[in-house]
Image: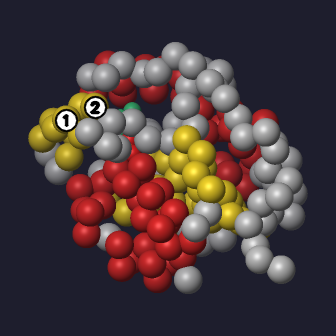
């Protein structure tokens, strides 16, 4: 039987901090990675999107994201996949926000029962790697099989196809 794969990701374009300078990204780093994984796996793609997005500007966005994290908020999502029952493997992508996932990803993980499913986390970051995101995923999805994560430096995303390919295999 073919295993069915879902690539669920959170990513934010607009202003971001890349290797020491502020830059405007038209496509977020994690989204670039998600589409590489789509090409490699043929999986379905789902974007995790909050109803009230964070500000486009980097400084405002980091402040808002930090406040949400400190309050352990669960930002409301715009939509969900109807069901994840058919998926065996979930590639879960997100930027590192203050050493873990954006809180909207917490909302997403709490919405479904991931028991018995394989979660493969991938994270883009500016130096902190996966942070504590993997242990947070394990807490939110205690009965999932959380495999080794892949951390990619955001500024090197366009050059990381090979690395992603060997992680996917
Ligand atoms: C709100 C916010 C918080 C961040 N916190 C961290 C952090 O704690 N550690 C880190 O290495 N990078 C941090 N970054 C950088 C992002 O993880 C990095 O730029 C990532 O590639 C952005 O992914 P995206 O373009 O898919 O949104 C942060 C960025 C934002 C906007």
Spatial CA distance of label 2 from label 1 is 5 Å
Residue at 42% x, 21% y: name it. Answer: 54
How many labels, in total? 2
Residue at 58% x, 52% y: name it. Answer: 45
The secondary element bearing badge 2 is classed as: strand
Q: Is residue 9 left or right of residue 139?
A: left
When asked about the image quadrant of residue 51, the answer is top right
**Is 2 in front, or is 94?**
2
Q: In the image as oriented, which residue stretches furthest toward the left?
A: 21
First reached walking from the N terminus: tag 2 or tag 1: 2
- On whether ligand 1 comes within 8 Å of the CB at mark 1, the answer is no
Report which residue position mark 1 lands on: 24
- Which quarter of the image is occupied by the N terminus? bottom right
**Is 148 in front, or is 66?**
148
Can residue 101 be seen in the rendering of this structure? no
Q: Which mark is residue 79?
A: none
Pinpoint residue 83: horizontal percent, then vertical percent.
81, 44
Pinpoint residue 90: horizontal percent, then vertical percent.
68, 60
Can residue 47 be seen in the rendering of this structure? yes
Q: Residues within 10 Å of mark 2 (few under 14, many from 20)?
A: some
Q: Is residue 111 left or right of residue 158?
A: right
Q: Do callouts 2 and 1 mark residues in contact (Cβ within 8 Å)?
A: yes
Q: Residues within 10 Å of mark 1 (few under 14, many from 20)?
A: some
The correct choice, above or below, for 137 with respect to 118 in the image is above
Report ligand 1 position as a quadrant: top left
- Which quarter of the image is occupied by the C terminus? bottom right
Report which residue position mark 2 lands on: 14
């Amino acid at each position: 039987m073919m295993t069915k794969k879902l690539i669920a990701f959170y990513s934010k374009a607009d202003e971001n901090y890349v290797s020491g300078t502020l830059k405007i990204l038209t496509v977020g780093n994690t989204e670039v990675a998600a589409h590489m994984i789509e090409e490699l796996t043929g999986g379905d793609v789902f974007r995790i999107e909050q109803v009230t997005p964070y500000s486009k500007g980097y400084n405002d966005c980091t402040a808002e994201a930090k406040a949400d994290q400190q309050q352990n908020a669960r930002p409301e999502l715009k939509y969900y996949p109807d069901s994840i029952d058919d998926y065996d493997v979930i590639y879960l992508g997100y930027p590192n926000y203050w050493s873990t996932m954006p809180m909207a990803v917490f909302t997403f993980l709490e919405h479904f029962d991931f028991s018995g499913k394989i979660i493969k986390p991938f994270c883009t970051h500016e130096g902190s790697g996966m942070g504590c995101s993997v242990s947070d995923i394990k807490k939110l999805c205690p009965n999932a099989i959380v495999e080794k994560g892949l951390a990619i430096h955001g500024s090197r995303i366009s050059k990381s196809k090979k690395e992603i390919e060997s992680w996917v295999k």
